[in-house]
Image (cartoon, grey):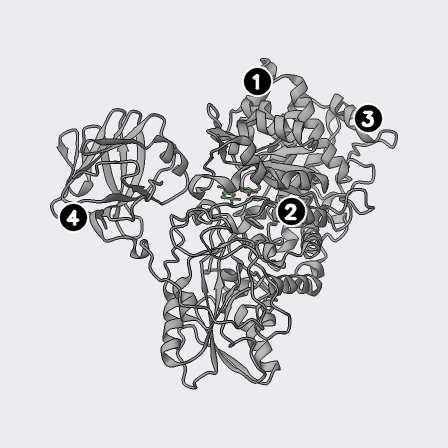
Amino acid sequence: MPGAATLAGCATIPAASEAPVAPVATARLTGEAQIADLVSRMTLEHKIAQLIQPQINTVTPEEMRQYRWGSYLNGGNGGPYGEEFAPAGEWLRLADEMWNASTAPLPNGEPAIPTIWGTDAVHGHTNVIGATIFPHNIGLGATRDADLVRRIGHATAVEIEVTGIDWNFSPTVAVAQDDRWGRTYESYSEDPRLVATMGAALVEGLQGRKGADDFLGEGRVIATAKHFFGDGGTDQGVDQGDVNGDIDALKSIHAVPYPAAIAAGVETIMASFNSINGKKMHGNEALLTGVLRGEMGFDGLVVGDWNGHGQVAGCTVSNCPQSLMAGLDIYMVPDDAVALHSSLLSQVRDGTIPMARVDEAVTRVLRVKQAAGLLAPNAQKPSERANAGDLTKLGSPEHRAIAREAVAKSQVLLKNDGVLPFAAGTNILVAGQAADSIAQASGGWTLTWQGGRELDNDMFPSATSIFAGIEQAARASGGSATLSEDGSYTVRPDVAVVVFGEEPYAEFAGDRKTLVFPDDEGLDLLRKFESEGVPTVAVFLSGRPLWMNRELNAADAFVASWLPGSEGAGVADVLFDARPATGKLSFSWPATCEGTPLNSAQGALFPFGYGRALSDTAPMGKLDETCAFLGGGAAAEWYGNGRLANGITATAGGTDLPNLRGTGGGVTAIGLDKDRQEDARRIAMAAGSSLALRGEGSGSFRLSYSLEAAPSGPVRATSGTATTDLTTGLTLAAGKGWREMLLTPACLADAGDSLTIRTEAPLTFSLASVERVSLPEGTACSF
Ligand code: BGC
Ligand code: BGC
């Protein structure tokens, strides 16, 4: 590759002022003529590079100059120069370096096409410290305020521009149908029309209105509607899973937001990880091309999701002509760009991929760049563009005011026995570990991919926690607020606010088996105050509705607060009636705990659209607190904490494996540290081997396990006379970390006194526990 040898070992790229920038455009050509001209002058190598998107944890400016990748991204755990928490200026510096590398002149008059940077600013530009953190989409759905969402999009775009980034992978227009799904909070609603309205509004906010002077201009960035399609409809809410059913019925729910986003001018659409009726979307020509291009008339570009092409049957992350042929234009391939480039190159050369398909995809990429002004003679490097480097715009008071308004409008009041609103002069105790945690109020996709309570408030300069917001409001009204995480006090308060809820998660890490909220901290606090005669307000932070009957019974008022973000004062605005409580549920709220999909007509405790005004103090009757999944069923542990229970044996091909450790019959089991030293096992099984656990007991099997790679041949479980195929379930679970497998009579009819796993191809997995549990009748098998 040209220049590679001289660049190797040289860490710095000359600043743009020194580097001669080759304008790709001539004044004479515009529109399609310009694009056709550019495509005609590009080498095949550079065309293919336009279709490949690596991540900044892997790609360097040197590699950019060598390959000329058309775009690149930062993942949720990525930051410039390996610094996840790098200050905004460093993001901009990297953007300039990448721009310079991509536009360095090429020989023979070949045009050097500027690269673009994509990011997940899914609730504000939240990969970057100091940005405004808006409520996650589930909360925005509760506001029903499309104009507000449009303003949020604009504010987010401005903050993205501060860091020199071009492209936002947002909005998520999933129509979540099963609240057990870990991405429910990224969904505006279970209702497709509400999602369509809000998604289109965010597109307009991010990109500007099509035809308007500022479309993709100052304060605007490229938007992405994602993930096409069916992400919110997977079986049992399993992230990246299979969506089953009649295609027209599926379209009538999950495809509805796309025509609205397309009409709003969305430039890009991201393909989804899920499969539909067994076929992965990244290889699904009928849907990716037939429906999206044909029926819906989308003419922008389709970007893949994180190695999503690697999940297509017959593909690997570095070899997958199928996706391009199915209609994908850009492969998101975080770490294997170079290998993918070389396989695509040979596939074009040997005719597997027609040149026309490459040109079509490159044309789509260039159109987006043209629309964003990057192919114009006056195109500027990132730091010279509007808003770039203007740190006063990152988390500006104006943007925070929009976020605070959104927080207030998203609070949904589910119960109020009259304790709200707080009168002037009230003395308030604020309890719960979440009360002063901005990280917990922000949820996933916040500074890191997963987010997390370990990100302390110092990481969120100028942000306001829920407690801090209550304190300001209380003081201003002549009262007081005291933070006491454990709820203890010396002076009896007038009222206690208990802030509690789900700890942050993202994607599959948030998948759940039921809607039981297993953390009792909030419930215990509410009951403690109840027994002390202190009235309570429950503020519940969550990425979805959960079964809350016990907490609703114990509290005098209950607010579904969702994941409000950095402007916690918006919560106090509602509690003190500085702003009216207008939030309405965008998801129906479950009456029971098992978590099978609801719709508002059936099974909901509070239907879609529910939300009280502060003045509505009509009493709420006692709710049923029984839940067959509470406590998870009496469990007999067969294996756990590194030991087999008394009377339980493990064997492989006739060889005894004491404490599930050792080698025999093609199986090797070694100690592995999960939470404690050697509390788990890493088990490697050869093709055709079996591992059997035997002992007393009855009921379903519950396994805590993880496997890195999908099985490459059939895997079955046998108990007594029943056998079930695990291959599909294990394929879904692969690469998603520690998970729980339930083998119930739904798939393993005769749960006998043994469990045998047999694999036809080599299989490696980790195992932390095996239990026998009694679960409610009808509980599905799950992975
Ligand atoms: C997610 C996308 C995201 C991408 C890049 C994927 O895992 O599914 O929503 O845009 O990563 O971070
Ligand atoms: C990245 C995310 C991405 C995820 C996909 C993470 O390491 O940071 O952006 O969505 O992987 O599995």
Q: Position of residue 507 (x, y in %)?
A: 48, 46
Find residue 199 and name its label: 2
- Please name which of the two marks, 3 or 1, marks the residue nearer to the observer: 3
- Please name which of the two marks, 2 or 4, marks the residue nearer to the observer: 2
Q: CA distance from mark 2 to mark 4?
A: 53 Å
In this view of the protein, which residue sits in the foreground, 711 or 425? 425
Report the amino acid beneath label 3.
Ala
Q: Which residue lies at the image location 36% right of the left edge and 64% below the top edge?
A: 520
Label 1 belongs to which residue? 346
Q: Which residue lies at the image location 66% right of the left edge and 54% below the top edge?
A: 89
Q: CA distance from mark 4 to mark 1?
A: 56 Å
Q: Position of residue 219 (x, y in %)?
A: 75, 51
Report the amino acid beneath label 1.
Ser
Q: Which residue lies at the image location 60% right of the left edge and 15% below the top edge?
A: 349
Q: CA distance from mark 2 to mark 1?
A: 39 Å
- Please name which of the two marks, 2 or 1, marks the residue nearer to the observer: 2
